[in-house]
Image: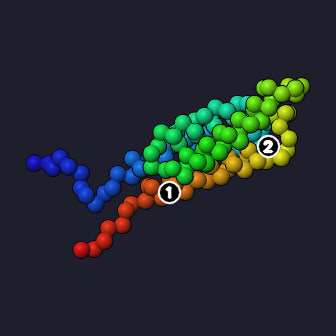
Amino acid sequence: MIPSTPPLDRPNQTAARTSRPALIAAWAVPTLVLGQFALIAGIPVAVVLISALRDPRSPALRWWAGALAAIYAAPLAFWLVGPSSAPSLSKSMSPVVTAFVVATGVVVAIAHHVLRGRSGAPAREQAT
């Protein structure tokens, strides 16, 4: 008869990892902002924020994703509400703000990689 329980020496590595769409979205934010598609970068920012809030295992990632959303929302709000005559969000953002959004996006993407590697590693068992 075949046992119905999985062996104990193989941990479930896929359950503890961050999602691949969230990782792709995290790298898409700085890429889109640098490529002068800052308004479209709001979609990956939302994906990163939602995936970080839904994952209860990584509170540090929640803070970084929240910081990315806040840093992205500030120039977006200034562009929408302010008296700027810039035709796009990318044209409205100064190089300093662009660098700040890109740097935060890169940090969030690296945090996804670090947390993905940490949580996907098999747990060490002590010899008894």
10 Å crowding of disc 2: few (<14), some (14-19), many (20+) = many
Sequence order check: which comes first, mark 1 or mark 2? 2
Q: Amino acid at mark 1?
A: Gly
Q: Which numbered tag is attached to residue 95?
A: none
Q: Vertically, is 4 above or below 83?
A: below
Q: Amino acid at mark 2?
A: Thr
Residue found 55% across the figure and 57% down from its top: 114
Residue found 61% across the figure and 48% down from its top: 64
Where's the C terminus, which quadrant?
bottom left
Mark 1, mark 2: which one is toward the viewer?
2
Rendered location of residue 23, percent (x, y): 57, 44
Residue marked by disc 1? 117
Is residue 87 left or right of 15 when viewed as pictured?
right
Marks 1 and 2, how far apart at CA: 29 Å
Residue marked by disc 2? 98
Q: Vertically, is 103 above or below 38?
A: below
10 Å crowding of disc 1: few (<14), some (14-19), many (20+) = some
Judging depth in this view, the residue of 6 and 30 nearest the camera is 30
Quarter where residue 81 is shown: top right
Rendered location of residue 26, percent (x, y): 62, 43
Q: Residue furthest left?
A: 1
Is residue 25 left or right of 72 when viewed as pictured?
left
Secondary structure beneath disc 2?
A: helix
Rendered location of residue 71, percent (x, y): 71, 42
Judging depth in this view, the residue of 110 and 92 nearest the camera is 92
Q: Vertically, is 116 above or below 43?
A: below
Residue found 58% across the figure and 39% down from its top: 49
Any part of residue 61 in sight: yes
